Image (cartoon, rainbow, N blue to C red):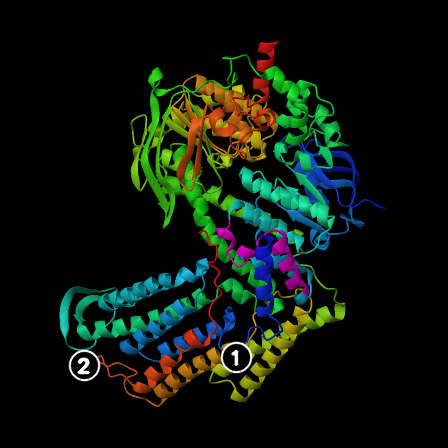
Amino acid sequence: MSPMVDFASVTVTYSGAVQPTLLDVNLQIDEGELVLVVGETGSGKTTLLRAINGLVPHFTGGTLAGRVTVAGRDTSTHRPRDLADVVGVVPQDPLSSFVTDTVEEELAYGMECLGILPDVMRRRVEETLDLLGLADVRNRPLLSLSGGQRQRVAIGAVLTSHPRVLVLDEPTSALDPGAAEEVLSTLQRLVHDLGITVILAEHRLERVLEYADRVVHVPGAGRPVIVGSPQDIMATSPVAPPVVRLGRLAGWSPLPMSVRDARRRAPALRERLHPPAGARGNVRSPSPPSLDSGRDCVISIDRTRASYGHVPALRGITLDIAQGEVIALMGRNGAGKSTLLSTLVGLRRPDAGTVRIDGVDPATMTGPRLIGRIGLVPQDSSDLLTRDSVAEECTDADRDAGMPHGSTQDLLARIAPEISAQTHPRDLSEGQRLALALSVVLVASPLVLLLDEPTRGLDYPTKERLSALLRDLAASGHAIVIATHDVELAAETATRVVVLADGEIVADGPTAHVVIGSPLFAPQVAKILATADGGDVPLTVAAVRDLLAVSG
Amino acid sequence: MTAVGVETAGVDLTAVRGPGGVRTRGRRRLPRALHPGAWWLWAAGLAIAASRTTNPLLLVLIVAVAGYVVSARRSQAPWARSFGFFLKLGLVVIAIRVLFQAIVAAPIGTTILVTLPSFTLPEIMAGVRLGGPITAESLIAALYDGMRLATILICIGAANSLASPARLLKAVPSALYEFGLSIVIAVTFAPQLVTDLDRIRSARRLRGRAIGGLRGTAGSALPVLEGALERSITLAAAMDSRGYGRQAHRSRMVRRTTGAALLGALVMVVIGTYALLDASAPAALGLPLLATGFILGGIGFALAGRRSIRTRYRPDPWTWPEWGVTACALATAGIVVAASVQGVSGLIAPVDPIAWPTVPAVAVLAILISALPAVITPPVPDSARGSRT
């Protein structure tokens, strides 16, 4: 049987690039496999995915040497539209790829293009609505859907054409943990029940690794692509989720791929970690500084309410944040996290209540006064960047902040030394762009640093550097607020977790206390090491390492 | 979740069985959306009626009828809220019309309310007179005229909020589909641009820069355009991967015939129209040429449509409610136009001297006929179920 997707010595070189993005890739994917593509940011994962339906090179330009065939069709002679009936592609941002306005019409759009008969279309739409659990939103405008629903509509919209291969680029990166589960269980059902071949790229391996049959590691920089079973790849891969890193640390073999695997092997480790009486606690995460310890309260929010039209976004939030604290602001999509951040920088005036940054109402501040007190890195960090090169951007930032020339460049060199000053900000990788945006914001040395979903699209090494940087910044007196869905980031960096739901604070306390009890917000290590009595457990692999070092 | 889904699907499957769509069974009518074309016809009927009268009472009646039908039959979709916007637009139109009358136009009547300082523009600007006496008669005339214009606009707004442009697109002939789609996408991009502009301005504030003024605007414009360009590329890639633009194979013969038919039709229609409008051209040439042009154009479109392999998902059926709405539109427009041709008094409100307009019963009746669609059409489906916005 010939493979469903076949890459035969494929090399992709974009025009103007010095070296090929993909070099001599040989890859055969069989029918009904779920293949996970991993790699650091900018390593060529997206290029690999887009080569499957011919978007590379038909749409993006560049040259593709070698041959890609899907279900026997060669992509050099078939354009993406000619492959639409065998390959379904779900792009990174579903909203920007929707063509129609309502769920049902979007599901039918692909079939209309393929000229499928009306009665067949009708039947498939109904089946897909049920399969993806979208029946009760069938008439809703796409704009009114939640993130998880949008992602499921985007999957459904390609499924109706009955493709034999489904390609997804980071399907869960923008979703909260609950919505991500929803999407992943849908995918698993497609593989198991319908025998669809699924190929997906994802950075949050902790979410998807356990579902994968095989893993393709794209190391980037022209090094050869490695294909293997999840266990084999994870044994050496620099990108690995906490469960794997804990397995490596504990010397488990074969490596666990899921929390369930790991828990079976964990009793011995739990035994070793169970600390002698009195010495419990999370060693790595600093204990939250309390207000009476003499630290200054830099953010104070008092009974703040905000709304969009008639829809309330914040319903009376009261929160005090001191210097040196790192707050993880969590909660599902639409819970009010971003609204709270924009209220903090004065982009929105609250309907009621007061917000004070260092004693001043942020809405009244502008220019250097504002950026010297508070800095926000928005969800899409490229919003902050407007110039044509990194160097110009840095010069601009120096001028905005009134700092001597070269300050931003120095800061950037400390955070991300590899960035060349002549690069266009758009050509930077996700992580590098974040580093540049951070430097631009930090050069004004704001008291308060806000980050909106900073780890979207970041690989593990970059994320670790970000965590370390944030901990350093907190130690030097900044107050940091991170709105995030990333429970691992929260476990690594936050001293305190605030959970929002429907515009209200539903949990507020030291990280360990808030996340350990929660099935959605607990990091993998805590899930693996949780004890029946619900006592304190380490939250990160680093914390486990420290504990092991202490206990010998 | 699945159980609920199956149940819902079951209901809807019975709802649209067969090409006739929903029929009344017993006394209960199943909710469905009316064919968008019917709504546009209905609005056109009201608009034609409005164009034939300056009687403010009749115009207000037309707006009331349109508003009544919209409130009875609009859906929960975002575009359905646009009626309010058109009402406000109507008020603005009236205000502008009255203002221009006061400042620029020559007055009629003798009841002078106030005299503005007047001056005449130099000959080179066509000697337009500005200011001067303002009479009650001319103000009233302008008010009526503005109301007529506003009413026509509001009728268009009513159609827009009852049937979105995107839904109208589904009824467009397939030869024009790709062209129509690009227009609809362009229209939906406009609100996105506003969101983008907002985001970029926020980002400028975060960098501590000015957001107002010339520099601020210039600094925001480029990133917004870049964003729009990038989004259109993403959308194009997504549409291509979903099979947009797949074409059926056509022989060279068919392609050439299509091209020739469309080009020929265009030439004939242009010449025919010219012959009809220009009194010096032979009248016998105009009509036949125009008719042939239209027939040829129809053939060309049909041939061009065969290139596309598109099928339509749940095309809106055209059954008796649509015919009913069409009949209402024809009745309203027909009766008012006929009345206006026969010179029924009261259609044109008296302005010089000013008098309380009389209301011709026949016109009132004609306009009220267009309120019937609020009752004879099936109710809208309840898409608000489970809505979270």
User: What residue do we see at 71% from left, 68% from top?
Assistant: B255
Q: Quadrant of residue B42?
A: bottom left
Residue B19 appears at what percent x and percent y? 62, 74
Q: Chain of mark 2?
A: B
Host chain of mark 1: B
Q: Residues within 10 Å of mark 2 (few under 14, many from 20)?
A: few
Q: At label 2, which amino acid type do we have?
A: Pro
For marks 2 and 1, give the CA distance: 47 Å
Residue A130 part of the magenta-drawn span: yes
Q: Residues within 10 Å of mark 1 (few under 14, many from 20)?
A: few
Splitting the image into 4 quarters, where does residue A350 fall? top left
Question: Which x, y percent locates residue B6?
Answer: 60, 59
Q: Residue at 42%, 75% (x, y): give it.
A: B375
Judged left or right of residue A196, residue A360 is left
Q: Amino acid at mark 1?
A: Trp
Segment tinted magenta in the rendering: A120-145
Compared across the picture, whether A31 is left or right of A416 comes to: right
Q: Which mark is residue B320?
A: 1
Please name whichever residue, B147 or B105, is drawn nearer the observer in this view of the structure: B147
Residue sitting at x 65%, y 73%: B302
Residue A390 visible in the snapshot: no
Tell us which disc is closer to us: 2 or 1.
1
Residue B212: image x %, image y %? 35, 41
Which element type, helix, strand or loop, lies under badge 2?
Answer: loop
For the residues labelled 2 and 1, say whether their Cβ atoms are less than 8 Å apart: no
Q: From the viewer's side, name the closer residue of A549 and A4.
A: A549
Which residue, given by chain and number where applicable, does mark 2 sit on? B353
On whether residue A447 falls in the magenta region, the answer is no
Q: Pick out the residue farthest to the bottom.
A: B342
Q: Position of residue A443 (x, y in %)?
A: 43, 23
Q: Main secondary structure of the magenta part?
A: helix
